[in-house]
């Protein structure tokens, strides 16, 4: 009887089992429906990713009052690509970019820009009264906070050029390069211009093919700068084949600046005075608030007004403090001390009479 009782049905147990089965089926239906809705939502967002990105970019341009056109050619979870980007008046745009590609990196703090590639960049800018005007591109750069610094991105720049119309003439800058922007970027920077005019002085044909690198948050520029001639009509002065070798280093905030510039020229003429080959050295170190350095200039021979000399030297130290209190904000203050050394002065210092060389 006991065995038979063990096989008898338990109505309460059956009801509990049926309830659990119904709840499980309901949960499966709800979970399945939620999964379908989630899949449809994600799929819809994926299909709508280009219109969403387009609306965001167009809205940001409109918010800043910037004319712009572009083509979105790729929107992915990592890589975003725009082509034929135009910023500014289409008849004379401030900026055009053939291709710009941005890679997004992900970390504990969220999404960040990891890599930027730009090809076929053309920038038109103006330099007037000491102010660089980037046109509508400048509106996209407004609103930044904190000190200027190099971004922590890897970048690749191909075929970039800027035409800068200044009060002195047209300056053309060309740049290529790749690497980590903050430290390790390796590229080239070329500066050129047909002529530059300041007052009655004219610099003829500027050429400056230089190396551009970054190191520990600083930009390093190194290379030659040369010109055919520098002539000033009012002073009747002409400098023949002036050449510079520059090595400049500084951060974007200009809190740490240093550099050295060597100078060479084949000669100089001023009315009836002539100087032979010229050499010079300028060194400086400091910041935009306090910049100090030294300068030295020498020539192997000099003549004028019927008098000929051998080697002549001029040297001195300088200090620039644009933020001097006694001059008021924004007004530069400079101090310069110099010593001239010529054969005549050396003779006077020794007490011996000086005679020009035959």
Image (tube, rainbow, N blue to C red):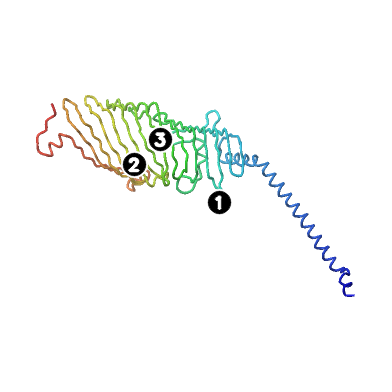
Across and down, in percent, residue 229 comes to 32, 26
Q: Which residue is mark 3?
A: 129
Across and down, in percent, residue 321 comes to 33, 45
The mark that comes first in sequence, 1 or 3, is: 1
Please tell me which residue is depicted at 45% across the width and 48% down the height of the picture.
Answer: 147
Please tell me which residue is depicted at 53% across the width and 31% down the height of the picture.
Answer: 93
The mark that comes first in sequence, 2 or 3, is: 3
Across and down, in percent, residue 62 comes to 59, 39
Look at the numbered disc 1 and give the secondary structure of its residue.
strand
Comparing marks 1 and 2, which lies closer to the viewer?
A: 1
Would you place residue 254 above or below residue 175 in this image? below
Across and down, in percent, residue 88 comes to 54, 33
Task: Give the quadrant of residue 126.
Answer: top left
Would you place residue 222 above or below residue 11 in this image? above
Q: Which residue is mark 2?
A: 259
Look at the numbered disc 2 and give the secondary structure of its residue.
strand
Q: Residues within 10 Å of mark 2 (few under 14, many from 20)?
A: some
Task: Give the quadrant of residue 54.
Answer: top right
The mark that comes first in sequence, 1 or 2, is: 1
Q: Which residue is mark 1?
A: 107
Q: Is residue 276 left or right of residue 103?
A: left
Marks 1 and 2, Cα distance to the nearest angstrom? 38 Å
Marks 2/3 in contact by CB < 8 Å: the verdict is: no
Quadrant of the frame with the C terminus:
top left
Pick the front one: 114 or 304? 114
Marks 1/2 in contact by CB < 8 Å: the verdict is: no
Comparing marks 1 and 3, which lies closer to the viewer?
A: 1
């Amino acid at each position: 009887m006991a065995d038979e009782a063990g096989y008898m049905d338990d109505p309460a147990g059956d009801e509990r089992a049926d309830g659990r089965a119904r709840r499980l089926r309901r949960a499966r239906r709800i979970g399945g429906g939620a999964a379908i809705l989630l899949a449809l939502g994600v799929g819809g967002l994926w299909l709508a990713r280009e219109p969403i990105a387009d609306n965001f970019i167009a809205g940001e341009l409109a918010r800043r009052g910037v004319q712009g056109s572009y083509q979105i050619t790729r929107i992915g979870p990592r890589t975003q690509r725009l082509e034929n980007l135009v910023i500014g008046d289409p008849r004379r745009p401030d900026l055009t970019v053939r291709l710009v590609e941005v890679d997004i990196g992900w970390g504990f703090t969220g999404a960040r820009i990891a890599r930027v590639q730009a090809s076929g960049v053309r920038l038109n800018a103006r330099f007037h009264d000491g102010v660089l005007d980037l046109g509508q591109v400048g509106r996209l750069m407004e609103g930044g906070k904190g000190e200027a610094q190099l971004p922590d991105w890897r970048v690749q720049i191909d075929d970039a050029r800027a035409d800068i119309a200044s009060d002195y003439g047209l300056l053309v800058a060309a740049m290529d390069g790749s690497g980590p922007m903050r430290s390790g970027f390796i590229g080239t920077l070329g500066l050129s211009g047909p002529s530059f005019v300041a007052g009655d002085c004219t610099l003829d044909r500027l050429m400056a093919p230089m190396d551009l690198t970054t190191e520990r948050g600083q930009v390093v520029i190194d290379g030659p700068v040369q010109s055919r001639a520098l002539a000033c009509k009012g002073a009747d002065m002409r400098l023949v084949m002036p050449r510079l070798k520059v090595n400049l280093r500084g951060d974007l905030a200009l809190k740490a600046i240093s550099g050295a510039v060597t100078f060479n020229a084949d000669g100089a003429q001023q009315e009836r005075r002539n100087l032979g080959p010229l050499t010079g050295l300028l060194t400086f170190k400091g910041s935009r608030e306090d910049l100090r350095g030294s300068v030295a200039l020498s020539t192997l021979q000099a003549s004028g007004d019927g008098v000929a000399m051998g080697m002549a030297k001029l040297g001195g130290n300088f200090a620039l403090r644009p933020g001097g209190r006694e001059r008021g904000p924004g007004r530069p203050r400079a101090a310069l001390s110099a010593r001239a050394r010529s054969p005549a002065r050396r003779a006077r210092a020794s007490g011996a009479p000086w005679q020009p060389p035959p």
